[in-house]
Amino acid sequence: MTTGNGGGVSGNAGQSGGGAGGGGCEPELSDSLRTFGAVLKALREEARLTQEQFASLVRYSVAYIAKIEQGKRFPPRDLLERSEEALGAVAGRVLKAAAKSLTRRAGLASWFRQWAGIEEEAISLFAYECAVIPGLLQPEPYIRALFERRLPPLSEEQFEQQVMARLERQRLLTARPNSSFSFIIEQALVDRRLAGEGVTLALLSNLLDVGRLRNVEIQIVPRVQEDHSGFEGPLYLAETVENRWVGYVEAHDCSMLVTDTRAASAMLQRYGKMRSQALSHQATASLLEQMRGAL
């Protein structure tokens, strides 16, 4: 087993759940984001366009373009195509080349990146959460609600960078259609109605939408469940391309990567038991529909 100071797969620390924890755990500005921003700025100035003019052409706000040029925002995918229309084909090719240096890990806390790298290559990814909705399933309003409650508070730059990083990371679900994703979550996490009915409605809709993907299975553990094997807390498991299982657990400002095969096997056994104890994928979808209709 290897340990790290801080985590981030779900809610309050780095990326999927975590945030800045202190003691060297602050998320770092990505050099690749800075490079991309500098290239975009140079191409815009070469075209003799102000930020205001360029923002209007690519249909984003001036403030948003300024943040991208400063390396403080992860550029959305459609920015490349819109920039080519505004700056020309040659500039578009240069910008696409710069974009290749970008990574889903931009905005991730350094101590979470080892798991994030494993996660990106996994052919199977399992997650059980009893504290917060897994990061891969969080809609943007829910993400923002979590980071607004982060203690100690994040700076505006950290806040926005981590929100964008988490949203970018969620593309794993569609970018890897041959990978299997399984999520087990406690019903109490939805019942809590974090940040109010509006955020909860967005959460329920997102869970239903993501659950329709062929490579994603979501199961809820009902409030009353006498036979429950998740009493040891949240866990994450990834199957590598070599068919080796690796585990990950985190709590507050501590995280642990589980590489010992025996320990990972025990986690896998517990997860398999919980899958049999939770509601089926279909029953979960029905429950989520009922909960959304009741709001």
Image (cartoon, rainbow, N blue to C red):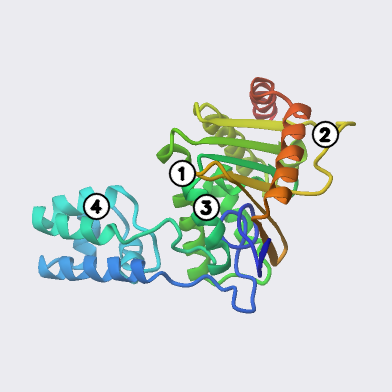
Q: How many marks?
A: 4
Q: Amino acid at mark 3?
A: Ile
> Residue at coordinates 49% horizontally, 36% vertically from top-left?
179
Q: Separation of disc 3 and disc 2 at Cα?
A: 32 Å
Which residue position is annotated with label 1? 172
Task: Give the image quarter of residue 109.
Answer: bottom right
Q: Indicate the secondary structure of the residue bearing disc 3.
A: helix
Find the residue positioned furthest to the bottom: 23
Q: Residue 279, position in %: x, y?
A: 73, 25
Q: Which mark is residue 80?
A: 4
Q: Amino acid at mark 2?
A: Arg
Q: Separation of disc 4 and disc 2 at Cα?
A: 46 Å
In terms of sequence position, does the residue under pointer 3 or pointer 2 come before the other? 3
Q: Indicate the secondary structure of the residue bearing disc 1.
A: helix
Q: Residue 273, position in %: x, y?
A: 77, 33
> Residue at coordinates 28% horizontally, 65% vertically from top-left?
36
Q: Separation of disc 1 and disc 2 at Cα?
A: 30 Å
Task: Give the image quarter of residue 57.
Answer: bottom left
Q: Amino acid at mark 1?
A: Leu
Which residue position is annotated with label 2? 223
Q: Residue 42, position in %: x, y?
A: 18, 71
Of labels 3 and 4, the one closer to you: 3
